[in-house]
Image (spheres, rainbow, N blue to C red):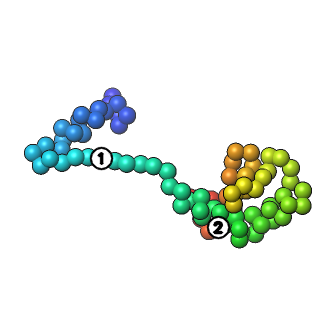
C-alpha cells in the first residue's frame, strides 16, 4: 500500500503542467521569533522571575543556569506560563 512517504517526487512533478514552465520550490527553516518571545516572557513572567531570583540567591543548583536571556535546565529551555507560549 502506497503512502505519502513512499511516493516519488516525480509523481508530483509529472502532475504539473510542464508547458507553463511551472516550478515547485518549498523552503523551510527554523524561526527564531519564538526564542525572542520566550526571552521577553522570561523577563516579565512571575514564574520565570521567581526562578531567576532563586538562581541568583543560590537556591537553585546545576543544571539550572541563566544564559542569553533564557533560563536553562541542562540543555532544555524553561518556557514561562505566559499566554499560549508553552503551546507554541
Q: Which residue is mark 1?
A: 25
- The reply to whether residue 2 is visible in this rendering is yes
Residue 66 sits in which quadrant? bottom right
Q: Residue at x 69, y 60 (%)?
A: 69
Disc 1 crowd, CA 10 A, few/some/many (<14, 14-19, 20+): few
Q: Residue at x 77, y 66 (%)?
A: 49
Residue 82 sits in which quadrant? bottom right
Q: Position of residue 26 (x, y in %)?
A: 34, 47
Relative placement, left or right, of 29 versus 18 is right
Residue 55 sits in which quadrant? bottom right
Residue at the top extreme of this rendering: 1
Relative placement, left or right, of 87 versus 45 is left
Relative placement, left or right, of 48 versus 18 is right
Q: Residue at x 75, y 69 (%)?
A: 46
Q: Position of residue 13 (x, y in %)?
A: 22, 39
Residue at the front extreme of this rendering: 68
Amino acid at each position: 500500500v502506497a503512502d505519502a512517504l513512499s511516493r516519488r517526487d516525480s509523481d508530483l512533478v509529472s502532475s504539473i503542467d510542464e508547458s507553463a514552465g511551472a516550478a515547485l520550490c518549498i523552503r523551510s527553516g527554523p524561526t527564531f521569533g519564538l526564542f525572542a518571545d520566550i526571552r521577553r516572557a522570561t523577563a516579565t513572567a512571575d514564574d520565570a522571575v521567581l526562578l531567576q531570583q532563586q538562581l541568583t540567591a543560590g537556591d537553585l543548583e546545576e543544571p539550572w543556569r541563566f544564559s542569553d536571556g533564557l533560563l536553562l535546565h541542562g540543555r532544555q529551555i524553561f518556557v514561562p506560563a505566559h499566554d499560549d507560549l508553552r503551546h507554541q
